[in-house]
Image: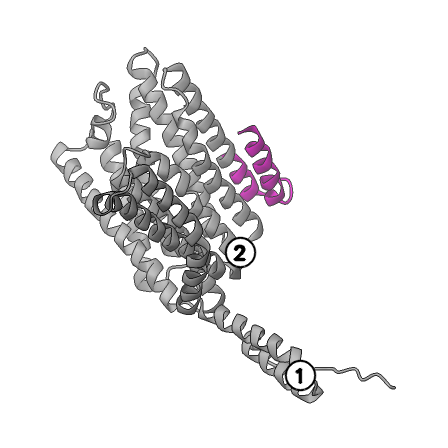
Amino acid sequence: MVMGVSVMTRLIGDSAGTRGDPKGALVWTAVIAGVFALAGAVTLDVLDGQGLSTLQWVPFCFTFMGVGVVILRRATVPTIGWLFLLVGVDVAASLFFGSYAEFGVTRDVPGAAWSAVCFTLTIWLSLTVFLVLQLFPDGLPMSPRWGGVARATVAVTVIGMISSGLSAQEDFTSNFPSLKHPAQVLDESLAHSLFMGAQYATLLLFVLSAISVALRYRRSRGVERQQMKWLAAAGAVASFGFVVTALWSEWVEPVVAFTVLMPLVPIACGAAILRYHLYDIDRIVSRTTSYAVVTALLVGAYGVAVTGAPRLLPVSNALTVAAATLFAAGAFRPVLRHVQSVIDRRFDRERYDADREVDGFAARLRDEVDTEQVVDDLSRAVSQTLAPASMGLWVWERDV
């Protein structure tokens, strides 16, 4: 954590530019508050006998805060940078408020109930992550109509914070049943209606945010399309991990999977906004998909062989397991090559066609002796693979 603080400090120092820069000072304040909140939550959990479970949230908080700082420093999309920074600091604050409230349940410490209220407020504030999905990559809504969705996200967040902050709702009573809400101002029925309305609206906003990502990807072209691919790829990996852990929660805790996989989203978004290896996403998606498909195929074949062969053939279970293991190991590379070829043809057609054209040109070049034919082949290969706006070729002929 100390190393992370020092790295982030250097980034913020660079983002501040000069002394007295209000943006740099605000970033400084936000990140320092987030780091101290995270450290305070870990300390309180240890003192309360909860262990180091809060440490699993460190990657989540640091990636969101770090990517936010880097975007604010280097990119021209400050809205996205501020949103990432806000999400990271908010989650760190939520951990601290929750830990302090839990610590105060069995101890006579001041402000435990108020800390529990702040915990509920930060939970609602985390809905700003929907704005990241709606406004990525340029910080602007896709259209005026989708701008209304962004405003609705802010409104739902405010309504949820009001209902939880001024009345004892489920997010308070279920997490802190032994604490009494210190600010029950709103009428109970009104507050409950606002709370439940905000809960249902949150589900709708989640769906709309996912739809906005899909629509923006479909409508995007050029650089923006590549940027959307980074977000879609990270979201797909994280979603797949969430589903797997939800189905087999006895193997991996869903919370652990969330804290491990969710940081992929800010990392991917940061890479896309900064255009760092932007066009490598096609190759990454292609390779990831290929390995996932091959692994699923071989695991399925392995399971069928291990469970089915002993019932059909008079062989021992140990021999079946050994044979299935050897088959899976031996078939991995050939199956991977075939699957990779199919996926490249289907989902990475431009790169596949370019590679095929370059390979064809290299094969023809080995047997070609006519200079004019070589020049024609080279021009055609460059045109079909790189598609330049204009092209010139200079050929040096040595005097003999």
Which tag, 1 or 2, sits closer to the chain's start? 2
35 vs 215: above or below: above
Q: Depth check: 28 or 45 in front?
A: 45
For the image, the number of numbered tags is 2
Q: Which numbered disc covers residue 368?
A: 1
Q: Is residue 72 visible?
A: yes
| Circle 1 or circle 2, nearest the eye | 1
Say which quarter of the image contains residue 288: bottom left
Q: Give the residue type that dot 1 points to.
A: Glu
Q: Secondary structure at mark 1?
A: loop
Residue at position x 38%, y 44% from top? 325
Residue 208 pos. (x, y %): 27, 55
Marks 1/2: CA–CA distance = 50 Å
Give the residue number, with chain letter if any, for mark 2.
Answer: 76
What's drawn in magenta, residue-wise? 1-29
The quadrant of the rendering that contains the C terminus is bottom right
Which SS does the magenta portion mostly show? helix
Q: Depth check: 192 or 250 in front?
A: 250
Say which quarter of the image contains residue 374: bottom right
Residue 396 pos. (x, y %): 79, 82
347 vs 191: above or below: below
Badge 1 density bin: few <14, some 14–19, many ≥20, Cα 10 Å: few
Residue at position x 63%, y 86% from top? 376
Q: Give the residue type that dot 2 points to.
A: Thr
For residue 18: magenta?
yes
Residue 188 pos. (x, y %): 14, 32
242 vs 209: above or below: above
For residue 113: magenta?
no
Q: Is residue 138 visible?
A: no
Badge 2 density bin: few <14, some 14–19, many ≥20, Cα 10 Å: some
Q: Is residue 355 left or right of residue 18?
A: left
